[in-house]
Each structure stands twice: as C-alpha cells, then as structure tokens.
Image (cartoon, grey):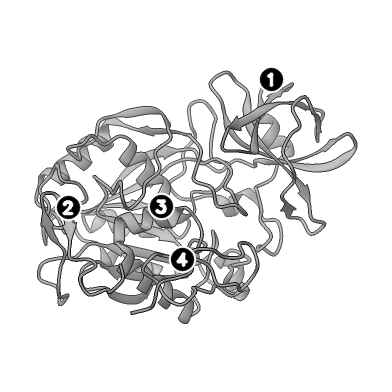
Amino acid sequence: MRPALPEKSQVGKPGVGTRGPSGSGAALRVPPELSARVPAEQRGAGRDAVRLLVGRRGGGEVSHHVFADLPSLLRAGDVLVVNTSKTLPAAVDGTVEGVPVVVHFSTRQDDGRWAVELRRPDGRGSTLPRPGGPAGALVELAGGGRLVIVRPLSPRGDRLWVAAASMPDVVAHLYRHGRPIRYGYTERDQPLSAYGTVFEAPSPDGLGSAEMPSAARPFTPAMVTELVSRGVHVAPVTLHTGVASAEAHEPPFPERFRVPASTALLVNAVRRAGAGGWGRPVGRGGGAGPAGGGRVVAVGTTAVRALESAAGPDGLLTAADGWTDLVITPERGVRVVDGLLTGLHEPEASHLLMLEAVAGPRLLAEVYGQAVERGYLWHEFGDSTLLLPWEAGTNQTNPPQIVDGERRGDHAQCPGL
C-alpha cells in the first residue's frame, strides 16, 4: 500500500512528483521519457500493439497485456460506448499587433462565435501559455481571416476567450489553413490522419473535437470486426472535446454532446439484464449484468461524460442532444458506466477524478503505480488502461459491498483513505 501523495506539485516540470490518484503513494513521478512522442506506427508497431494495463476493482487485480488482447478481455453482451467525434485541425497561426500567436479553436458557441485560446509559439513547433485577451484585440489569421477577441469565456479564468470570426465558415478555414493541436511532449507535427479513430464520423453540422478522443486510437477495423463477431456491442455517442488545459489542469468547460436513442435503448436493455459487477440493481448506478451478462464499458472519458450527462437518477439513459457542463467526481460517482478504457493521464489532470469515480482510489493508485514502474507510455499516442468491475466467480477477495445503493468496502484494506 503506497502512502498518500502530497496535495501540491510543480505542475509542468518534467519528472517532478505530482499529486496523482488519491490512494496512491509516495509522489507519483512520471519521467519525461514516458511521454509518447510519436504514434505507435512510427515506433515500429501497429496501432493495436500499444500496451494495455487491466485493473479489476474489488480485489485490486492488475494484469498486463497488449491492446490486441482486448477482445479476449471482454465478453458477449458487453457494450463498448465510443465517441464518434472527428478531430479538427484546430491550430491556426496568426498575429496580434504583429506578434506571432497560435490560435487553438475550442468550441463554437450557439451564436456562431468561437471559444479560442491564444498561445505563443515556442520555436519548436509547439506552443506555450500566453496571457489571455485583451478584449478588443484583433487577430490576423493565416489565410486572410480575422478574429476579434470579445470577452473571457467564463469567470473561472482568462485562458479561453469568446471571439468573433470574419470567416463565413470557420471549420472550412481550419481545414485549409489549420493543423492538429500539438503539445510540447510530442516530437513533431503529425498529419490529421494520425489523430483519427476508426469510429469517427462526420457531424451533420461539420463540427468536431479540438483534440482527439484518443482512447479509441488503438482500435483497428479488424479488431472491431472481431469484437462484433464475439457478441460485443458497439454503441455511438458524440462529444466534441474542447481545448484542454495543458498547464493548469482545469476541469472541462461545457461541451456539445449527443446520445442517440439507439444507444440509450441498448444500454438500458443491458442494464436491465442484471445486477451488475458492482452488485447493484439497476437504478443504483455503476452496474449492468452479472457474471456472464453485459457490462457498459466507455471508451474514453468523453464517452463517460456523454453517457452520464444523459442518465437519470435511476441510472437509465434518455436520448440527449445539447451541452453538458457535468464534472464527474468520486463524490458524484457514476450511474451508468461499469468499466472504462482510457489512456494514461497526467497525475494532476482533472480526468483522474472521473477515473477514481469509476475504479475507486485503491485500484487507480495501483494501476498508475505499476504503469510508471513498468514503463508505460503517457498521452494521446501512448498506452492504454482498462478499468473493470469486480466479478463474481473471479479469484478476487473482498469485493465491494453495496449498502443503500452506495459502494462499501473499497477502502477497507487501505488505511488512511
């Protein structure tokens, strides 16, 4: 059992210990060499050759695989919920009063204006933070377009600003003059195809994600075929991701999402089929079918956010289309999701609160500790984790007990939590 991590850290400094999962131990340290700098294909492997670390809640069982093993780790009746949002080439060069900037286009607002982040180029193809605004500033964009900076998007800070664009079709301008958003841990620019997934589909309004829904990146068409042939269902949702907070690790801002009626019907049917890996009846959240039945496994934190935004207090879904400002924390918990397939996140990233809500602090600490110890790779081109519930019939001990709809027992053998 690792001792608790310190509450504060020096964010953004390579190799510095950071807060990490709340049950994890001596400062979780992610050395800079564990950043995946190029896609797996450029490291001499296929997309599905990345490593896959599997953790099962309850007994804390952890095992090590490659992503190509995923079909053997799921079972007939499981539902994989995938995000179909396409990645946009959302970074465009520009100038403010003659000074170079890079504009990251985040989300289109209902009035047609855009939330944007202005950053300064670092001379190596990536960017660094830049003071936001000011209001009224004029941004001259590559390709001849202009932005007028209007106001901060939110009282939470001045990283993202609302801007009015002179271009009649901003998305078309991005495809002509933009490139995928890139951060400093990557080695070089990549083509837009490197940021695509097998599940992406055009949105009727042409919108997409500012940054790749990267949990689905390792899937291949052959793997999807194998999963379906084994009886695993694939259900779509859409959530257009905004620009992440690479330095400050802020919670996500409101994002557009859609849960179609077909996905709601399928997920509800699976959840009604049994009590679930957590031992919960439908309506208590976080569980679908018993051993041999189906589980709802979200592919990525974006899929979790979409599903949970469409869930009622009874844990059942309704079709939904709009904006979500939901932030999932351990206190809020999850109502629909049984398992989560995702990448490895920075120890201070707000996504870890969601992972803790799904997996619990004890398992999450073990997974992240082993990922560092065994040299797993972080970020969008890195390795994957699969967090699954306890199952009756496995060799795990001390499964969580459910009392009045609440999960109990996860902390029983973990002093100090």
Give the vertical position of 85 relative to 368 (above or below).
above
Q: Which mark is residue 300?
A: 3
Q: Are marks 2 and 3 in contact (CB under 8 Å)?
A: no
**Residue 196: image location, x then y, percent:** 53, 49
Going 34% across and 36% down the picture, which residue do you hit?
Answer: 309
The picture quadrant where one finds residue 267 is top left
Label 1 sits on residue: 168
Label 2 sits on residue: 406
Give the vertical position of 198 relative to 113 (above or below).
below
- Front position among marks 1 and 4: 4
The answer to which of 170 and 361 lies nearer the viewer is 361
Task: Give the residue at the far right of this rendering.
Answer: 98
Disc 1 residue type (three-letter): Pro
- Front position among marks 1 and 3: 3
The answer to which of 102 and 327 lies nearer the viewer is 327
**Residue 29: image location, x then y, percent:** 53, 74
Disc 3 residue type (three-letter): Gly
Label 4 sits on residue: 20
